[in-house]
Image (cartoon, rainbow, N blue to C red):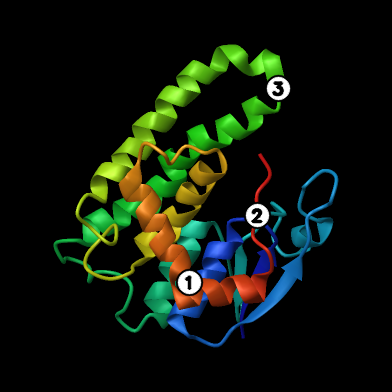
Amino acid sequence: MLTLHHLNDSRSQRILWLLEELGTPYETKFYQRDAKTRLAPPELTAIHPLGKSPVITDGDLKIAESGAIVDYLIRTYGHGRMMPKVGAADYEAYNEWLHYAEGSAMLPLMLNLYVSRLKEAGGPLHPRIDSELANHLGYADHALTGREFFVGQSLTGADIQMSFVGEMADVFERLGPFPNLKGWLSRMHARPAFQRSIEKGGAYRFAK
């Protein structure tokens, strides 16, 4: 049975969303963050040595890392949907967005999260972080000019993977200068499958 090991307020929400979009049967095992530390519970370590989420299990197969999970689920259960065909004109752009989301775009967002907790001590780092945030959010915003989705004319794994970038930018109130990205995020959140994922996964919120 395909199983998502779902941690509240985490990247696994986009995997839950993807599963709802695909409409494939799955089950969810829920894990809760510690209310004080906001860390994942030790039970997740029994599923994967890193103790992180998302993780999926599918029979004897176990996969961590959002991009790898998105890729696997679409190839295995998408039946030709939600990704361009290998060799198609949009395929390389699609593949790039899958890797870009975590490989580049999330770094300044996570630095902003952790450095902000340093209060005054983190002050000297903020100009560089702000510059990188503007660079990456501007890049994504420009890519969405005149487009409803990141790749092609319908929802793909690129949109699923990039959703966490937009959501974290929104938490830090950084989307104001980037109307294309802000509008895209609103459209994604309005999708029925996303709404179902929230109903099934629970309240979805992040602390600054």
| Residue 88: percent from left, percent from top | 16, 66
The three-letter code of the residue at mark 2 reads Arg
The three-letter code of the residue at mark 3 reads Leu
Q: Nearer the viewer, residue 81 or 42?
A: 81
Q: How many other residues sit within 10 Å of disc 1, few (<14), some (14-19) or many (≥20)?
A: many
The relative height of residue 34 versus residue 71 in the rendered view (above or below) is above
Please give the residue where the numbered disc 3 appears in the rendered image.
118
The three-letter code of the residue at mark 1 reads Leu
The image quadrant where one finds the C terminus is: top right
Measure the alpha-carbon separation of dots 3 and 1: 35 Å
Please give the residue where the numbered disc 2 appears in the rendered image.
205
Measure the alpha-carbon separation of dots 2 and 1: 18 Å
The furthest residue to the left: 89
The image quadrant where one finds the N terminus is: bottom right
Task: Give the residue drawn at x 49%, y 41%.
Answer: 106
The relative height of residue 36 versus residue 9 in the rendered view (above or below) is above
- Tell me the quarter of the picture where residue 112 sits: top right
Question: Of label 3 and label 1, which has the lower sequence position?
Answer: 1
Measure the alpha-carbon separation of dots 2 and 3: 21 Å
